[in-house]
Image (cartoon, grey):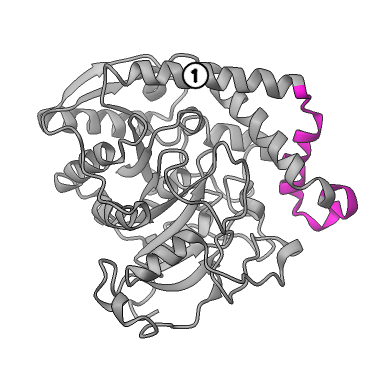
Amino acid sequence: MNTVISWVPDERGSDPAAASGPLAGVRIGVKDNIEVGGVRSTCGSEFFADRVATDDAACVAALKRAGATITSTLNMAEFAVGVTSQNSASGGSVNPWDARRVPGGSSGGSGVAVAAGVVDVALGTDTGGSIRLPAACCGVTGLRPSTGVLDMSGIFPVSADFDTVGPLARTATQVRETFAVLAGSDPTPEDTGPLRVAVPWPFVTGDVDPAITDAVTETVELIRRLGHRVVECSVPHSNSAQDVVYTLIYSDLARIHAERLRDDPSRFQPATRERISLGLHISDEQRAAAIRQRDVFRSAMADMFRDVDVVLTPAMPVDVPEIGVGEAVVAQARRMGQLTYPWSLHDGPTLALPVGVHPSGMPIGAQLTSAYLREGTVLALAEQVQEHSDWHLRLPPVRVSSGV
């Protein structure tokens, strides 16, 4: 499956206090742009093939203090740019449900590692969908936390305005337990009664694979049966959200990688170079306009979440693509990320969870989104959904032994 880039030496016993921590015994892998002291941190790139981290990223240090065992750094799209995880200098990862298909990206190795049992929990990063897409493609649960809520030090950036780090695991409960350690407190939901769960139906039915529409609609009905109030909503400015995010992300990428693009562009994976180069053509005026649109969108989201608690949408509008089949790099990225990018522009949390199986046999994912700092709300609803369904318990045909 090509999910691990580096194995981490076992340090259990080096901190006796951690042995009784809340994550004691939990095996965790981290995306290879998250630094683990003394271990290579390649970001999936030839440029960083021999780069060894000096210190632990803040999130890794927090996990270790809680007793977790950091086992590995995990494969990823080069510099976290890509939705298929095929553009890694270490070679692409494959989906454990079907090796002919992509695992999603850019945290593809993280999704594969959890689904295949290589680790119990993985950390990924999410800028435009890079936790949620692998979660959806691999049939696991993944949280993009609120922007800025977790310390990003020791993580190689894509775009400071959108970058987040978050956990992927089989269950929402495991995600909550890991997030509690990273955030320093348990994300207790503010809502104790029935939630107002809003569905923007064009996200569910418009230009969406019918099997995905059916699975998400069944999830809506389950939520209704659980006693929550389901309402319809619209998402203001969503038609332009993807372009706004792309403008800001690509301009940031071009700035971060300007020297590498100028001096040695051939060392990039071709798909990475193609996408980063788009940022070279974005003017200061275009970027300034995108920032204004971002602020308008976030203001509209804050208004919307005064009237609803959670918004439910599919995670992807299409079935998990086959490797090397279909649209060109940029077009495929836009299509797979069509429903994740609006929630990247929002500053609140979004959680992806499995809600069905496509006729192809691949997992189907949905997203639960709430207001800024309302991680507890989406996690509590996801836990309730998983108590009354079993999609998260399905195992792929390719699994490793628990001893790995």
Residue type, mark 1 in image: Phe
> Does residue 257 appear left or right of residue 212 in this picture?
right
For this orientation, the residue located farthest to the bottom is: 13
Would you say residue 39 sits in the magenta stretch? Answer: no
Classify mark 1: helix, strand or loop.
helix
| Residue 150 on image: x %, y % | 44, 48
> Does residue 141 appear left or right of residue 272 in this picture?
left
Looking at this view, is 76 or 97 the one in front?
Answer: 76
> Does residue 117 appear left or right of residue 4 in this picture?
left
Q: Main secondary structure of the magenta part?
A: helix
> Does residue 44 appear left or right of residue 369 in this picture?
right
From which residue to which does the magenta span run?
261-284
| Residue 126 on image: x %, y % | 50, 45
State the residue at coordinates (29%, 78%): 17
Name above or below for residue 60 compared with residue 328.
below
Q: Is residue 147 visible?
A: yes
Looking at this view, is 121 or 62 the one in front?
Answer: 62
Looking at this view, is 33 or 98 the one in front?
Answer: 33
**Image-quadrant location for residue 304:** top left
Looking at this view, is 127 or 227 the one in front?
Answer: 127
Q: Is residue 358 visible?
A: no
**Residue bearing the label numbered 1:** 297
